[in-house]
Amino acid sequence: MVNVAWKQFIQRYKNLPVTAKASFWFLFCNIAQKAVSMLTIPIITRMLTTDEYGTYSVFISYSNILIVLGTLTLYGNGYFVGMKRYNEEKSRYTSSMAGLMFTITMLLYVIFLLYQKQITFILHQSFFVITLMFAWVFCNGAMNLWFVENRYEFKYRLIVICTLFTAFATPILKIVFILLFKATGLDKALGAMIGYVLPIVITGIIAWYMMFVNGRAIYVKEYWKFALSFNIPLIPYYLSQTVLNQADRFMIERLDSASAAGIYSVAYSLAMMVSVINGAVNSTLIPWQFQEMKKGENRKVANVVNLIMVIVAAVHFLLIFVAPEAMKIFAAKEYYAAIYVVPTVTIGILVMWLTQIFINIEFFYEKNKWIAVSSVLSAIINIILNAVAIPRFGYLAAGYTTLICYLINMVFHGMVAVILIRQNGNNKAFDLGKIIFLVVCSIIFMFFTMLLYEQTTVRWGIVIIVVMVTMLKRKEVFGVIRQMWKVVKEK
C-alpha cells in the first residue's frame, strides 16, 4: 500500500511543470538552510558567552553592510529588469555582472589597504577580520548572482546541492572552529567567523566558475552601463535597508555593551525565522507579479496578494505567541530576557514584507529614486532614535525604533505606489485598506500578546482554540493554499 502511494507521488511529481518543481525545491532549500541554521543557534549560544556572541553578530552586521557597497546588490530586483531587457543574452549578461562585482569589490579592498589604520580604528575590527569580511562579500555576491540566474530560468539541481552544502557545512564548521579556538586559547568569536565564511567561499568559487564558463564575458559596456545607471541610485536604498536591519547590533555594542548586542542578536535571530517564509514567498511572487502586471492583470495580482499576506501574517503571529517557550529552547538562560524583543522585531519584519508589495510596483515602473529617498530617510531616523533611546532604555528600545522606521518607510512607499498606479491608468495591484487594517491588527496583537507572556496557560489555551477553529474551517484554509499553489503552477 505504502509502495503504491509512493509510486503515485513520484509520478505526480514527474508530471509537474518545471516551474512548479523549481518553486518546490527553492522553497525546500530556503527552509532547510534556515532550519539548520536555527537549530544550531542553541548550540552556538551555549558555546559562546553573550560578549562573544555579540562580537560575532557585529561581524555579520558589518559584512551585510559591506556587501551592498561591494556588489551594488546587482543580484537584486534590478537583475530581473536586466533580464527583461536582455532576455536573449541571459548568460552573457550574468557573467558580465559577475565581472562588474569583482571589479567593485577589488577596488574597495584596495581602498581598505591604503587606509587600513583608519578603517580598523573606526570599525574596532582587526585587519584579519575585515579581510575575512571582504572574502565573504566577494564570494557571497557571486553565489547570490548565480542563484538568481538559475532561479530566473527555473534550473534548480545545482542550486539545491550548493544550498544544502552551505546549510550543513556552515554550522558544522562554526562548531569545529569554536572548539578548536577554545582548545588553543584563541578568541572563540573569531572561530565562529571563520566557520561562517569558509562554506560561502567554497560555494562562491563554484559560482564564479559556472558564470564565466557559461557567459564568457567579464566586461560588456552596454550591460555595465545599464547596471550602474540602474543600481547606483539604489545604493542608498539597499544600504539604508541594511542599516535598518543591522545597525541596531553595532549601535547597541557601542552605546550599551557587547553582551547586550549578543542578547539582542539572539532575539533578532529567533524573529528572523519567519523570513524563511517571506523569502520563499517573494521568490515565487515577484516574477509572477511582474508577468501578470505586464498583461494588465492587476486585479488578479491584488486578490492573490490578499490571500498570501493573511497566511504570512498568521505565521508571524504564531512566532510571537510562542516566543517565551521558543527562547528557552533557542538559547541559554543568559539570553532569556530578550523575549520582549521578539514581538517588535517580528512585526517589523512583517511590515517590511508588506512594504515590498509597494516596492515591487516601483521596480515594475522603474521609478528607483523614490525607493532611495524613503529608505535613506528611515535609516537616518533609525540611527537618531537609537542614539537617543538605547542609552536611556537599553537594548529593548532598538526593537521599537526599528518598527517605527519600518512603518514610516511603508507609509512613504504606499503613497508612491498609489501615485504610480494612477499615473499609468491601471487598476490597483493591491488593496490598500486591507493592508492598513492588517498592520493595525498586528500592532494591537503584539502588545496584547506581550501582556500574556507570563500567563502560559492562557496563551496556550488561545493556541488550542485557534487550532480547533482552523480544523473546522479546513476547507477554506486548504482552498487558499490551493489557490496559492495554482499561482506557482501558472508561472
Image (cartoon, helix red, strand yellow):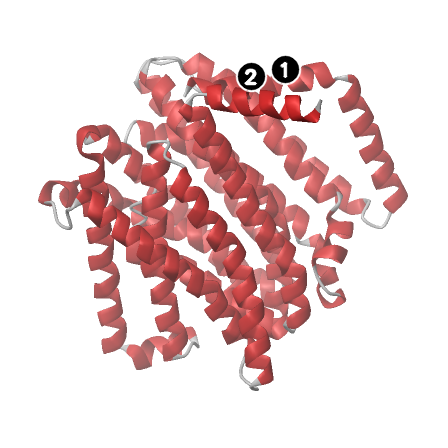
Nearest the eye: 273 or 248 = 273
Nearest the eye: 328 or 120 = 328
Is residue 350 in view? yes
Residue under the image location 34 percent in, 75 percent down: 119
Q: Quadrant of residue 256?
A: bottom right
- Image position of 280 with respect to 299: above or below: below
Circle 1 sits in a helix, a strand or a loop, which is it? helix
The quadrant of the picture occupied by the N terminus is: top right
The residue carrying pointer 1 sits among few (fewer than 14), some (14 to 19) or many (20 or more) residues within 10 Å by Cα, namely few
- Percent coordinates x, y for residue 196 in the rendering: 48, 64
Q: Which residue is mark 2?
A: 483
Residue under the image location 50 percent in, 31 percent down: 24
Q: Amino acid at mark 1?
A: Gly
Q: Is residue 410 left or right of residue 307?
A: left
- Percent coordinates x, y for residue 254 in the rendering: 52, 72
Disc 2/disc 1 C-alpha distance (Å): 6 Å
Q: Is residue 56 left or right of residue 394?
A: left
Q: Amino acid at mark 2?
A: Gln
- Percent coordinates x, y for residue 340 in the rendering: 71, 53
Q: Which mark is residue 479?
A: 1
- Image position of 77 with respect to 488: above or below: below
Q: Dots 2 and 1: beta carbons under 8 Å? A: yes
Circle 2 sits in a helix, a strand or a loop, which is it? helix
Q: Quadrant of residue 435?
A: top right
Q: Is residue 363 left or right of residue 331?
A: left
Residue under the image location 73 percent in, 68 percent down: 334
Residue situated furthest right in the rendering: 457
Residue situated furthest bottom in the rendering: 185
Nearest the eye: 426 or 161 = 161
Q: Quadrant of residue 171?
A: bottom right
Residue under the image location 60 percent in, 48 percent down: 35
